[in-house]
Image: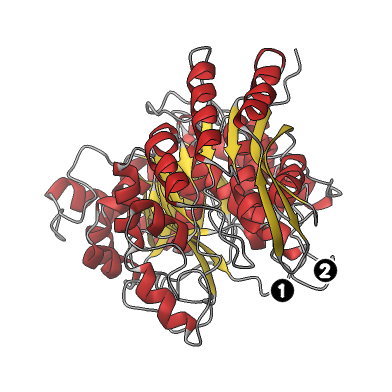
Amino acid sequence: MNQTPMIWSVAGTDSGGGAGLAADQRAADALGVHLCTVVAAITAQNSCAVSQLQAVNAELLHAQLAALADDMPPRAIKTGLLGSAANVKVLAHWVDQLRQRGPLALVVDPVLRASTGASFADAELLAAYRELLLPRATVITPNRAEAAALAGWQPLGRPGLSSAPADADADADADAATLPALARALRQCGAASVCITGGDAGSALAADWLLTPQASGWLSLPRIVTRHQHGTGCTFASALAAALAWGHREADAAVLAKMATAGALAAGRAAGAGAGPVRAQPGFAWHAEWLPQLSLGEALPAAPGSPSRQNSPNSAVVVTSAAPGLYGIVDSADRVQASLRGGVTTLQLRIKSAPAAGGNTEPSGPPALHDELTRAIAAARQAGVLLYINDHWRLALALGADGVHLGQEDLLALSDAERQQLLNSGLRLGLSSHSLWELCRASALRPAYIACGPVWPTETKQMPWQPQGLHNLAWWSAVAPVPVVAIGGILSAAQVQAAAASGASGVCLVRGLGERPGDTVSALVDAMRRGLAEHGSAVPAPQATLPHPCL
């Protein structure tokens, strides 16, 4: 059986080849899925205007779907221009039928209005979306005007939502403040996940509000300034559906869709007198400049190059340019000293038995913990080795530690004030990441390093994440804006060398240090050096594949 995922796009044709099924096909090709093109509507348009729209009759739409159902069943369906309430009803019927046979993702891109201004929806069609598609949707991807219309908050096309006014940045801020609540309202209508796209807002930042079971926040990139942006929404929704078909969860699929759309915008070019089409490109996922950031809260991130806002990622964190190298994780000051004798480059003291994280540990700490940290910090400083304290950031700050490492659950548990205190403290910050969205969230804070794991299966702790493998580690290392540290299941010198050869700037060992780190570390350091040299001398190969699913 062919393992290439199958997706259907139920959408409209664009006679100018810009949006609709034409854009969907380019996105599907870029993500390596097979696209079945189901025509729901036909438009007469060029790059300047839509002159006519005709929905196909419901019987013909039904026949297309029936023809595909048995021979080419989809893992995901993406909708675009549907044209009529009757077509929405047919599609809803088939979604239910297909879901009786197995899992099926439904990505609803509610195409209600053309970028040229033509309306594609009346009250009946809008009601059909609300009643029949939103309750069945895995993800909906409306722009701001479409989201407000679907929720009944504003008539479609309210000035300032569908076009950029003179003071675009101020308008974007005003509208953006309502988007988290608007997304929650749409989820109450039945949509499992919501991504309200912000590419049409006109501000310096292209920021989408993401609300999924895995994560929420602003998914943002600096705006790519181009006239040629026809088909952007179609590309985003189709790329998201393709990523879901590959097995990615909703938040990670949105990250890949954002990257694919950025690449498509960068490759857009003229095809007529008006706005040219975007062109999704294979290999987009390996471009570091297209990795978005994910905010920790609901405040709109600062625009690129503007002064940092009070609650934005701080610039005071000291980021070391030195590679973390062989990175030992130990649970006592005695093991810190033993690892230092072996020649580790970086150390982390992880003591989990005492109160930790959340900002609630008193700065003085329990006496035993205070003593362990004091001894460990002194030993590492004398050896000239960076030492990170896991979780206990207040005590680490009070004792003058070099840095602190946090898991993302611990980071999210901090209040805004505690997080700002940590970020402004001058402590080096290391962050864990296990998924694409966690990488994007960590990247927004520009830490000293980002850990990628588990690279191999690990017994150190239970977790829901799939092993990343060397392929995902190489992707992390290629796109992350700071050094990447490999962690998880690394027990041998061969694994250390392989991780470093994949691009990791640091390799973490816990059990791999053995009972006597002073006797084992030297060989591991040599393996790290060999791997880094191997990576440095390798000829980069074209990267067309996606990172594999993390959950």
Please name whichever residue, 68 or 435, is drawn nearer the observer in this view of the structure: 68
Q: Which of disc 2 and disc 1 is earlier in sequence?
A: 1
Looking at the image, residue 288 lies above or below residue 317: above
Q: Is residue 427 visible in the rendered structure shown here? A: yes
Q: Amino acid at mark 2?
A: Ala
**Residue 529 x/y as whole percent:** 70, 47
Disc number for residue 227: 1
Q: Is residue 385 visible in the rendered structure shown here? A: no
**Colouring method of the image:** secondary structure
Q: Is residue 46 left or right of residue 5?
A: right
The residue located at (55%, 54%) in the rendering is: 324
Secondary-structure class at tag 2: loop
Labelled pair 1, 2 in contact (Cβ < 8 Å): yes
Looking at the image, residue 476 lies above or below residue 71: below
The residue located at (36%, 78%) in the rendering is: 309
Please name whichever residue, 447 or 90, is drawn nearer the observer in this view of the structure: 90
Q: Amino acid at mark 1?
A: Arg
Q: Is residue 303 left or right of residue 154?
A: right
How many numbered marks appear?
2
Secondary-structure class at tag 1: loop
Q: Is residue 17 left or right of residue 164?
A: right
**Considering the image in quadrants, where does the N terminus appear?**
top right
**Residue 260 x/y as whole percent:** 67, 52
The residue located at (39%, 39%) in the rendering is: 191
Please name whichever residue, 409 or 336, is drawn nearer the observer in this view of the structure: 409
**Residue 90 x/y as whole percent:** 54, 28
Please name whichever residue, 202 or 470, is drawn nearer the observer in this view of the structure: 202
Question: What is the distance, in whole Å, between disc 1 and disc 2 at their CAs?
Answer: 9 Å
**Residue 458 x/y as whole percent:** 47, 26
- Give the residue pinned by disc 2: 270
